[in-house]
Amino acid sequence: MRPSVEKAIISGGSLALFLGIWEYSCGRLVDPMFLSSPSRVVAAGVDLVRTGEIWPDVLVSANEFIWGYLAAVAVAIPLGLFIGWNRRAQYMVQPFIDVMNAVPRITFLPILVIWFGIGIWSKLAVVFLGAVIPVTIAAYSGVKTNEARFLRVARSFGASGFKIFTSIILPGTVPFIFTGLKYGAGRALLGVVVGELYASTAGVGHMIAEAGNTLQTDVVFVGVLIFTVTGLVINGLLDRIEKRFERWRPAGARQ
């Protein structure tokens, strides 16, 4: 049996078993008020889609995630590459990155709400803060892990700093950048959820909060499912994009 087929059978079987146990337990072993069954979750999702009630919340959350995440990427990748390449810039910026990395960015949410209100700007800010640090650290680490022997050879042949950066530093950093992008996407989604749970009048996180307050566990799981699927889709897209840069990787690192 081919490994891919074996993987699909085992993974699919374990997931089906888990869902079957979950479905059987609800209403028999667990009160549905506390844990909704998969069938009820699907029914609630279909109903929300059919009535169109869910789309305004999805649109709000999507806007918060997309613009906050893109802004973080636009800042983090150049910043990480720059401080990794420039020693003096690293000395100047590194303490701030270390501090921000040590502090959970979610703790800034109350002050962000005070500054920007409960509208979209406070959510954009917390999404940005959640994603910008891991992507910056990944890009910076990628620059620092480039092999010194490659740099020495390039310099011995008189390569310019720009040529060294574009032909050695940047290609060697790409896998690290994509790792940071994946981790940053997860942090950004967390920012959307917490921001909307804490202070919001719309969004999937707000929908989850409202459903939880009214004990609609099926709707809560619909919201959780939306964020889960979003995270999986984003990681899948980033994986596909990363494969286009496979030729930049050292031969020993290719799968």
Image: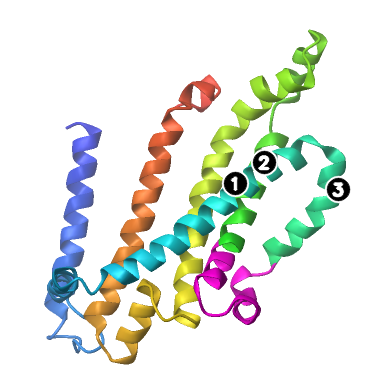
Q: Residue furthest bottom?
A: 214
In the image, residue 167 above or below residue 134: above
Question: Do the CB atoms of the residues marked 2 and 1 lie less than 8 Å apart?
Answer: yes
Q: Where is residue 228 shown, x and y percent of the image?
A: 34, 61
- Amino acid type at mark 1: Ala
Element carrying mark 1: helix
Element carrying mark 3: helix
Of the two numbered discs 3 and 2 in the rendering, the one whose residue sits closer to the viewer:
2
Q: Quadrant of residue 114?
A: bottom right
- Amino acid type at mark 2: Pro
Residue range corresponding to the magenta coloring: 103-127
The answer to whether 104 appears left or right of 118 in the picture is right
The residue identified by callout 3 is: 91
Image quadrant containing the N terminus: top left
Mark on residue 74?
1
N-terminal-most mark, 3 or 2: 2
Main secondary structure found in the magenta portion: helix
Element carrying mark 2: helix
125 in magenta: yes
Which residue sits at x=39%, y=75%? 205
Mark on residue 78?
2
Q: How far apart, in angstroms, are the residues tagged by discs 3 and 1?
A: 22 Å
Q: Quadrant of residue 88?
A: top right
Which residue sits at x=81%, y=10%? 158
Q: How far apart, in angstroms, are the residues tagged by discs 2 and 1?
A: 7 Å
Q: Where is residue 112 shown, x and y percent of the image?
A: 63, 75
Q: Residues within 10 Å of mark 3 (few under 14, many from 20)?
A: few
